[in-house]
Image (spheres, grey):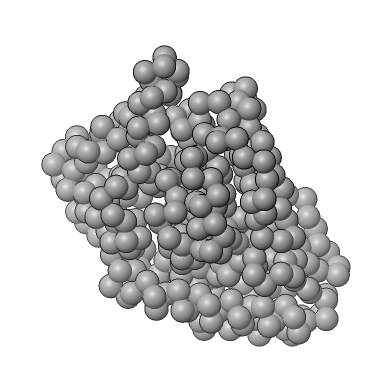
Amino acid sequence: MKNKIYFTPGPSQLYFTVEEHIKEALKKNILSISHRSNIFKSLHKECIENIKILLELNEDYYIAFTSSANEVWERIIQNLISKSSIHFVNGSFSKKFFDFTKNYNLNSRLIESFNKPYDFNIKYNNEDLIALSLNETSTGISSTNEKISEARKKFNKSLIALDCVSGSPVIPFNVNDVDTFYFSVQKCFGLPSGLGVWIYNKKCLDFCYKKINKGEIVGSYHSLIKLHEMNQKNQTPETPNILAIFLLSNVINDMNNKGLNKIINEIEYKSKIINLTIENHPKIYHSINNEEIRSKTVIVGETVNNSELLIKELKKNNLIIGKGYGNNVNQIRIANFPTHSKESIEMLCDYISKIDF
């Protein structure tokens, strides 16, 4: 039977080298090694170094592994917010991050922005943290590098956190404009789910230490300080997802060898094909009309009829696209990640163009 191709926004199609890396992990017995062994320390160090090369991180930034990006939300709330935060919300995931703050009785504000770029012309009280999204997976809304730089200038007394879950490493931004950013591996990195990557700078550590000195709780086993202390020894607090770290290191090495600029150019090309397909189809139109904020990695289309009709027709040809987030029955989401070849995107778009539903 012909293999399915997954254009779902996460989990998605595995990166094309993952199968060989899994075989290598089994051959080297990676899945059985101790997380306190020198072998693991070497693996951890290599993965961190590969990430730093790919994202061009300077010495002020550090990297910790978590179970998911959702976990990072809670770690940020516990460690990097003392009293207040502002959350710029443009979809369900950025809204969930804000919702988490209410469980901690924080004085957090929500600023919604769905049809236009972020508007930073708001009342600013030097809040502890500003939360932004590089790419909102639920709605297909992106933020530009210029907007993130604008936030840095406007909110210069606050820590800035950037959700990069479906954006890194292919939606560029100036890393120095943010203090912490994070992603999970099952989207743009084309890996099985179960690993989050949390990047933070020295300002985050300083803020966390201030919280501790004031007697505020910053978590327990997974406080930022504990994660950082273990990270400095190329270890993790508990037994981590060793296979995921091994695979991430190898896939990032593959990306580094290919060249990130080439990968980004491919993303641009493929997104144009998908956009044209939506624009030329009589029963699909763009959910995000403003091209300035339209995602290049998760492209969302509105359907005149129930989107399940289109999804089922594509599935007959082993092409799997995403549904609208939540209960949206008149929407499709198409992932355009590095693992999706130009040929597979072109084939998908050819099929979509021919389906009348």
What residue appears at the point 52 percent right and 38 percent down from the top-left corner? 129
Q: Measuring 25% from the left and 50% from the top, which residue is drawn there? A: 59
Of 131 and 151, nearer the camera is: 151
In this orientation, does residue 89 appear? no
For the image, the number of numbered tags is 0
Q: Viewed as shown, does residue 158 lie left or right of 273?
A: left
Residue at 71%, 61% in the rendered image: 116
What is the residue that sits farthest to the top in this orientation? 215
Q: Going by the image, does 91 lie left or right of 14?
A: right
Q: Nearer the viewer, residue 113 or 343?
A: 113
Q: Residue at x 34, y 69 (%)?
A: 255
Determine which quarter of the picture holds residue 284: bottom right
> Of residues 84 and 343, which is closer to you in this image?
84
Residue 37's spot in the image, x, y percent? 16, 38
Which quadrant holds the C terminus? bottom right
Q: Quadrant of residue 346?
A: bottom right
State the image coordinates of residue 97 (x, y, percent, origin top left): 60, 39
Q: Is residue 143 left or right of residue 91?
A: left
Quarter where residue 108 is shown: top right
Residue 101 percent location from the top left of the image: 60, 30
Using the image, determine if residue 343 lies above or below residue 149.
Answer: below
Residue at the left extreme, as displayed? 38
